[in-house]
Amino acid sequence: MENSASSKPPTPASTPSSRLAAAPSSRVSSAAPHPSPSSSAPTPASRTVYSDRFIPSRAGSNLALFDLAPSPSHHDAAAAAASPGAPPPSGSTPASSPYCALLRAALFGPTTPDRVASSASACSSSSSAGASPVGSPATGNIFRFKAEVPRNAKRALFSDGDDEGVLFPGVFTTRGTGPRKIPRSPYKVLDAPALQDDFYLNLVDWSSHNILAVGLGNCVYLWNACSSKVTKLCDLGVDDNVCSVGWAQRGTHLAVGTNQGKVQVWDATRCKRIRTMESHRMRVGALAWNSSLLSSGSRDKSILHHDIRAQDDYISRLAGHKSEVCGLKWSYDNRQLASGGNDNRLYVWNQHSAHPVLKYTEHTAAVKAIAWSPHLHGLLASGGGTADRCIRFWNTTTNMHLNCVDTGSQVCNLVWSKNVNELVSTHGYSQNQIIVWRYPTMSKLATLTGHTYRVLYLAISPDGQTIVTGAGDETLRFWNVFPSPKSQSSDSLSSIGATSFVRSYIRQLGAGALMYTMLGLNNIGQLMMLIASKLEYAKEAGEFLVQCPIPAGVVSCTVALL
């Protein structure tokens, strides 16, 4: 059986023995792939093309996607280049829209040329010269060769928020033109007589119920941040002094470490002592809660775990430090305990080991300042004393030293903000300042001064906006340094910075890339909710990574899951 251009297509009834299935046929024009708009030659007769699962037909394929045939947008761009005054054809979508420009700049860098524009210019120049454009079927080339992008050009898919003006010039206009303004003066100052000037003590802590606990001499006082009411919780007597205080997560129980090595647990709502544990031989300068488990660090070089539900004073002893334990913090998932000592060592322990699982010896002075990041699992910050003056960052998941920043003075305390990816450090010799840092660039957002002694004590309010600092000048100073959670989820993102980041981890989600275009999103909360609803299966795929810069005021965002 022959198939010619003039033959009639066979039917299953007329050719029952045909090997071709009754697949839908298509008529493909045999005209040249680049017909000239001014050509008046008649269209040649069409021929019938049969296809089945073994003989594919490409009549319905969009070859313009592979640059094998010019797309209508190419012709429109070429026509527009040839006649600038002519109106654009109806129904055509401009390929250089702000969305396309944003997506192209974010994926391939700000210096990447527009493919459609460059193809249009090539078509126009080639048409004037009487030649086919590069990459057209007339020349048989599949690949298009363009000018090389400079090697130093920014081609990062995940860019820092400070680079949005470089990546998207003229695309967005944000209301926040500069960094967030942080007040340089405290909004409240309280007298704290007998507040000790001792680097190794921890005498200030802020509860989840907005109650500030302060150890002054041999007494502990509670200050209600809502009513400014002061309550005397306990008096240890003339033979003992307060060395540390620490609130439980629920905010109802307060632990007090004393100079005689005792650890007391108080019910703050009733101002009643419910337990006293006498297991340390020397003063207890560090306390850390993990649900009903209380960890205490002492000058006797040991760390004890106390279960306040158990009858025994302690359930386990951790030994490893060669000098006084002065820093102690549980991670936010309550799986790792970080401890710092006067032996210049930083150790990381797990819940079930009596020996440290990670040992860091890079500090050259006492390690009192310890803080876990609430934004990234396993990110730990630590600060060294006068001989060290450095803030170091560690990844306890991979056991890597990430960064080191020389602050120029003794690092006394560190605390992360839970509202933004920033942290605060307090310092002693020789500048006695408070510094607000942006992570991970570690650029200084503000330097606060006012204390005349070393800023030894630091705590953060439960809403994450206010910090309180204490020093040997016997004052407590309250500073507004962080934005509120509401401002992070409102339209006024520019008031707290030009760009916010949504970070998580993605691994092995399958071949290729999933691209979600989410319209109508103007805050991080909506974005996180949408990602969670779209990617429930990602929880079973392991860690997943999505980093999406959201410029202030932008209501359109594209998240690429690679």
Image (spheres, grey):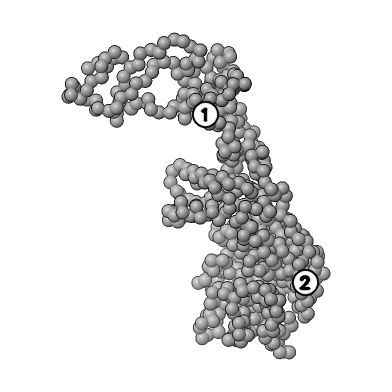
Which labelled disc corresponds to residue 92? Answer: 1
Nearer-N-terminus badge (1/2): 1
From where the camera sits, is residue 122 visible?
Answer: no
Q: Relative to residue 84, is residue 93 depicted above or below? A: below
Q: In the orientation shown, which residue stands out farthest toward the right?
A: 452
Q: Which residue is drawn at 53% across and 77% down?
A: 292
The crowd level at tag 2 (other Cα within 10 Å; few <14, some 14-19, many 20+) is some
Q: Where is residue 326 in the image (x, y as percent from the top left)?
A: 67, 73
Find numbered disc 2 in the image and state the secondary structure of the residue it sits on.
strand
Q: Which residue is drawn at 63% across and 76% down?
A: 246
Q: In the orientation shown, which residue stands out farthest toward the bottom?
A: 238
Q: Where is residue 214 in the image (x, y as percent from the top left)?
A: 70, 78
Residue where numbered disc 2 is placed: 189
Q: Residue at x 62, y 60 (%)?
A: 485
Q: Is 2 or 352 nearer to us in this picture? A: 2
C-alpha gap between disc 1 and disc 2: 65 Å
Q: Is 495 or 299 nearer to us in this picture? A: 495
Q: Is 125 or 441 nearer to us in this picture? A: 125
Q: Where is residue 4 in the image (x, y as percent from the top left)?
A: 29, 14
Q: Relative to residue 218, is residue 60 depicted above or below? A: above
Q: Residue at x 56, y 36 (%)?
A: 100
From where the camera sits, is residue 454 visible?
Answer: yes
Q: Is 141 or 13 nearer to us in this picture? A: 13
Residue type, label 1: Ser
The crowd level at tag 1 (other Cα within 10 Å; few <14, some 14-19, many 20+) is few
